[in-house]
Image: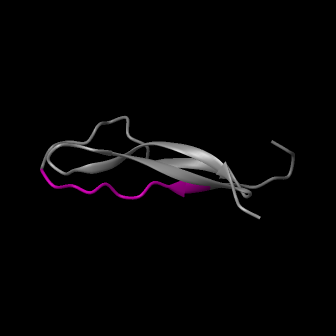
Amino acid sequence: MTEGKQKRTVFAPQPILISSLALPANRVISVEVDDNEDVEWMWTSLPEGTKYISGYTIVKKAD
């Protein structure tokens, strides 16, 4: 990281809960990125319809 660059926290979208099952404790909550970066979220869908963020990719912002 270049000195002087600002970091920002990007929070993951809220899970879509269809049932009362507990979500995994290790799911993604937030990611710190540089000002010139964005986050692409990876969703996991469970058989009963619940969806949650299970991963992410940090990408450079388009110019």
The correct choice, above or below, for 7 with respect to 46 in the image is below
Q: Quadrant of the N terminus?
A: top right
Q: x%, y% of residue 20?
A: 12, 49
- The reply, left or right, for residue 2 in relation to residue 51 is right
- The reply, left or right, for residue 48 in relation to residue 34 is left
Q: x%, y% of residue 44?
A: 33, 44
Q: x%, y% of residue 48?
A: 14, 47
Colouring chosen for the image of the structure:
one colour
Total residue callouts: 0
What residue appears at the point 65 percent right and 49 percent down from the top-left corner?
A: 59
Q: Is residue 12 magenta?
A: yes
Which one is nearer the viewer's eye here, 4 or 61?
Answer: 61
What residue appears at the point 33 percent right and 48 percent down from the top-left corner?
A: 52
Q: Quadrant of the C terminus?
A: bottom right
Q: Main secondary structure of the magenta part?
A: loop
Q: Quadrant of residue 38?
A: bottom right
- The reply, left or right, for residue 62 in relation to residue 58 is right
Q: Residue furthest bottom?
A: 63
What residue appears at the point 12 percent right and 51 percent down from the top-left corner?
A: 19
What residue appears at the point 86 percent right and 45 percent down from the top-left corner?
A: 2
Magenta segment, which residues? 9-19
The correct choice, above or below, for 58 with respect to 13 in the image is above
Q: Residue furthest right?
A: 3
- The reply, left or right, for residue 13 in relation to residue 20 is right
